[in-house]
Amino acid sequence: MQLVDQFLRKINYLRVSVTDRCDLRCVYCMKEKMNFLPKNEVLSLEEIERLCDNFIELGVEKIRLTGGEPLVRKNIINLIENLNKKKSSTNLKEITLTTNGSLLKRYAKDLKTNGINRINVSLDTIIEEKFREITRFGNLQNTLDGIEEAIKNGIKVKINTVVFKNFNEDQTTNLINWANKKLLDLTFIEVMPMSDTDLPRHMQFVSLDKIFKELNNTFNFNQSDYKTGGPSNYYVSEKLDIKIGFITPLSNNFCATCNRVRVSSTGKMYMCLGQNDYVDFRKILRTDRSDDYIKDKIRFALSIKPKRHDFIIDSEVKPYISRHMNETGG
């Protein structure tokens, strides 16, 4: 069975935010003083698993758990364990995770034991003072130790770096050299206009076209045909042993190959990260509705999945997307 949207794109990738909470406050993700959701508004792990089951039965092959920070969710390993058991008898082929790395030292072994073979770690700088500035109170060493622990346990780590103006745009070469020494693939990501943070989005944005041209002068990139199922375009260099990715939602729209949908921690299914439309599954899960009804609602949601996002970053335009990044996990 396959899930297909109205533009005949095959949808086989589900991103699930298991919590809106995070132990950091990255400036491009949320405001410093956040009001997090009451627990009863967040899907239970059993509700998340049931919803995932229906997506899997409809053809989803890959599930990525996000947040907030997914590892702050109580009993998250239980959910991962239960999802992992489904790989032997269902369409599900892979479970992955996006994390800030702060809790990886504690959880890396359990993640590996329960089928997590590949993770993305968000890391925007390797300078301690800068790290504290961007996360507002994070400890860089916790993240670096977590990365080492994941590697030690056989988990493949990819680094995700959001590039933004007057902060880390001058550190991209150093980040590449650091990642290369660790043999960690690295993806640069443009700032996206997801609600207001304490700093206006147009003051954070820098085009990755500009960054790519600067880096290409040093590394002389060649495009790679490597794909992970995500939106990144990867490049290789004779000077590097790793792949460098670029995710450019504003500079170079990638919606034509979109293969994913997102479910927020409250059970809202967003058909597009860059649109506000959603289908609310929390209400459905908390009433006496059958799995067939849930599947029909998933099919309906895909029938209205838009062709592309409408991201705009402009000093005269407020962010079109009203939710913060921690609600849907990027």
Image: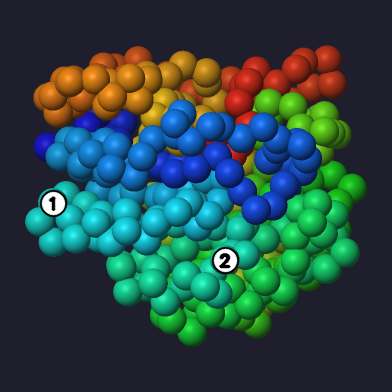
Q: Earlier in the sequence, mark 1 or mark 2?
A: 1
Q: Is residue 51 left or right of residue 264?
A: left
- The numbered mark at residue 66 is none
Q: Amino acid at mark 1?
A: Thr
User: Is any part of residue 66 visible from this angle?
Assistant: yes
Q: Is residue 65 left or right of residue 297?
A: right
Q: Is residue 274 above or below residue 220?
A: above
Q: Is residue 88 above or below residue 8?
A: below
Q: Secondary structure at mark 1?
A: loop
User: Is any part of residue 207 visible from this angle?
Assistant: no
- The numbered mark at residue 103 is 2
**If the image is split into quadrants, where does the C terminus sit?**
top right
Residue drawn where x is 55% and y is 39% of the image: 20
Q: Secondary structure at mark 2?
A: loop
- Residue 203 is situated, as x and y percent measured from the top left of the image, at 85, 34
Task: Answer with the quarter of the image where residue 195 lies.
Answer: top right
- Residue 68 is situated, as x and y percent measured from the top left of the image, at 56, 45
Q: Is residue 285 left or right of residue 71?
A: left
Please state which of residues 197 and 213 is positioned toward the viewer in this rendering: 197
**If the image is split into quadrants, where does the N terminus sit?**
top left
Task: Answer with the quarter of the image where residue 116 lies.
Answer: bottom left
Question: CB atoms at circles 1 and 2 under 8 Å apart?
Answer: no
Local packing at callout 2 (Cα closer than 10 Å; few below 14, some 14-19, many 20+) is some
**Marks 1/2: CA–CA distance:** 30 Å
Mark 1 — residue? 90
- Residue 179 is situated, as x and y percent measured from the top left of the image, at 65, 73
Local packing at callout 1 (Cα closer than 10 Å; few below 14, some 14-19, many 20+) is some
Residue drawn where x is 25% and y is 48% of the image: 61
Q: Is residue 230 above or below residue 140?
A: above
Residue drawn where x is 45% and y is 54% of the image: 74
The label nearer to you, 1 versus 2, is 2
